[in-house]
Image (tube, rainbow, N blue to C red):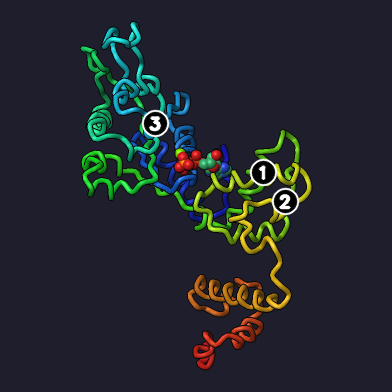
Amino acid sequence: MEFATRNPRMIELLNQAQKLARSEHTVLLQGESGTGKERLALFIHRNSAMANGPFVKVDCTTVPESLWESELFGYAKGAFTGANREGKLGKFDLAQGGTIFLDEIGDVPLPIQAKLLRILQDKSFDPVGAVETRRVDVRVIAATNKDLAVLKDRGLFREDLYYRLNVLRMTMIPLRERKDAIELLTQELLTAQMGRGITAPHLTAEAIAALLLYNWPGNIRELENACKRALVLAGGYGPIDVKHLPPEVAGELAVPPPRELFRRYMKSAELLLIRWALKECGNDRTKAARFLGLSRAALYKKLKLYPEFAAKQDIGG
Ligand SMILES: Nc1ncnc2c1ncn2[C@@H]1O[C@H](COP(=O)(O)OP(=O)(O)OP(=O)(O)O)[C@@H](O)[C@H]1O
Ligand SMILES: [Mg+2]
């Protein structure tokens, strides 16, 4: 499985993940929804000593309150009426020799948190109704899009479990903070949607601009959905244009501005980019000019047009 990225922070994150994968400790993946937590969990599993073992996912948001224990730990023969006569293996049994992925761990009820703590501490648990304690050799990866520290402070998440999980923590990077990845990712996602050997349609300059300007609150999952939709609307061929993107993404780029506003648009876009470039380059104007693909003289000429830069210019900064 590849992580398409040239973003330095993302590369750093993946290097870190590779290192963590080799240890046997519990990993906590924290991040907004759609940032790739599950994908990273799988990546860690596949780079770990457990790679040949199973990868078992538990979606902690969907387990009914009363079924938690039997879901995780299974139950012994004839443990309770209505139970399967032969007993049932829990997710921890199924993950034996592999990885268990506890997705949305912030949703685990408090009593179950105590049992998880025990597993993390001494790798053992008691199936419902069983006499014997069972031991497992399982790597635990947990993920959450909630702030566990806040849950802990509110008394909704056990402090000891919190600290136990917090040893190897990785925080996913929201898509809006690595927009340099968007073009490559979009290409990857489009290609993934196409049949084998079929080239994905390319994107128009306007479509790329819209993708870059949008903030992607739903992160990669939202981008993935936008790609699926665009392919359907573009009929699977021909360039993908702004009109094929969801309205919230297409935003103001969907229709050209009224004639009298072209100049205003040009100026405000330019001003915004210059501000960002200066900020990015710690106000170093030579660097900012290079950043924008302008000569130093050309940038200075532009700066003169905007009063907010005037003061510094007098000093020659
Ligand atoms: N680097 C990537 N390259 C391509 N696709 C990716 C990448 N990262 C994530 N995806 C895709 O984006 C979608 C969301 O990823 P994933 O389910 O791992 O995120 P998540 O953080 O668990 O999201 P959620 O909170 O919605 O469960 C998936 O379909 C996944 O395949
Ligand atoms: Mg997920």
Residues marked 1 and 2 touching at CB (< 8 Å): yes
Q: How crowded is mark 1: few (under 14 residues within 10 Å), some or many (20 or more)?
A: many
Residue appearing at x 27%, y 17% in the figure:
127
Q: Mark 3 points at which residue?
A: 62
At horizontal 63% and vertical 59% (from top left) the residue drawn is 210
The mark tally for this picture is 3
Horizontal side of 124 relative to 94 (left or right) equals left
- Horizontally, is 56 left or right of 83 in the view? right
Q: Mark 1 points at which residue?
A: 190
Mark 3 vs 1, N-terminal side = 3
Quarter-of-image position of residue 160: top left
N-terminal-most mark, 1 or 2: 1
Question: Can residue 102 be seen from the camera position used here?
Answer: no
- State the residue at coordinates (35%, 13%): 88
Instruction: Tell me the distance, in whole angstroms, between the alpha carbons under discs 3 and 1.
Output: 30 Å
| Whether the residue under disc 3 has CB within 8 Å of ligand 2 | no
The amino acid pointed to by label 3 is Thr
Tell which tag, 1 or 2, sits nearer the viewer: 2
Q: Nearer the viewer's eye, disc 3 or disc 1?
A: 3
